[in-house]
Image (tube, grey):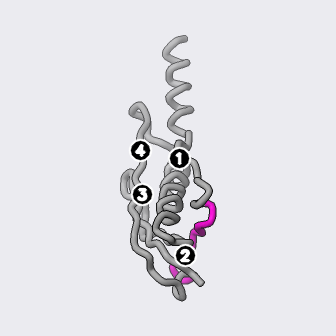
Amino acid sequence: MKPIVILMVITFLAGCTWVKLDEAGQNVSVLNPDEAESCKSAGKVTAISRAKVAGVTRNENKLALELETIARNEAATMDGDSIVPMGDINGNERDYRVYQCP
């Protein structure tokens, strides 16, 4: 019985999102490359998170959301108002281009 409870807790934690979108990050939009054509580049950010929790691979959608949240929070500190993913998730990280859009 005890191993089942431990497994349930680990499975639950693997699906959790740990990073919260801060107030400044809420003002950062996620765009596709076409939408950012008229925007000015403000740099690049690499978002990194945990791909596994207690040895269990995290839900891919939760990981993607967390990486996006990290990138939005960081873009706000760079005076960016938009981000564009620069490719797929690579293990536990993803690169984003940061923009200032009109």
SS of the residue under disc 1: loop
Q: Where is residue 64 shown, x and y percent of the image?
A: 51, 55
Label 4, label 3: how far apart the Cα atoms are: 10 Å
Q: Residue 25, position in %: x, y? A: 57, 60
Vertical placement of 46 versus 5: above or below? Answer: below
Q: Quadrant of the C terminus?
A: bottom right
Mark 1 or mark 4, which is nearer the start of the sequence? 1
How many C-alpha atoms fall within 10 Å of the one at disc 3: few (<14), some, or many (≥20)? many
Q: CA distance from mark 3 to mark 2?
A: 17 Å
Residue 48, position as x, y percentages in the image? 40, 53
The residue under label 4 is 50
- Find the magenta span and give its range: 26-35
Q: Earlier in the sequence, mark 3 or mark 2?
A: 2
Question: How far apart are the alpha carbons under marks 3 and 1?
Answer: 11 Å
Q: Quadrant of residue 17?
A: top right
Q: Which residue is mark 3?
A: 47
Q: CA distance from mark 4 to mark 1?
A: 11 Å
Assess disc 4: are there few (<14), some (14-19) or many (≥20) residues with their C-alpha within 10 Å of its C-alpha.
some
Answer with mark 2 or mark 1, whichever residue precedes in sequence.
1
- The quadrant in which the N terminus is found is top right
Crowd band around label 2 with a 10 angstrom C-alpha radius: few (<14), some (14–19), many (20+): few
Q: Earlier in the sequence, mark 3 or mark 1?
A: 1
Would you say the residues marked 3 and 1 are in contact, meaning their CB atoms lie under 8 Å apart?
no
Total numbered circles: 4
Q: What residue is drawn where x is 43% and y is 64%?
A: 88
Q: Amino acid at mark 2?
A: Asn
Question: What residue is at 55 percent from the left and 54 percent from the top?
Answer: 65
Mark 1 sits on what residue?
A: 19
Label 2, label 1: how far apart the Cα atoms are: 23 Å
Q: Secondary structure at mark 3?
A: strand
Q: What's the distance in space between the residues labelled 4 and 2, CA to CA?
A: 25 Å
Amino acid type of the residue tagged 1 in the rendering: Val
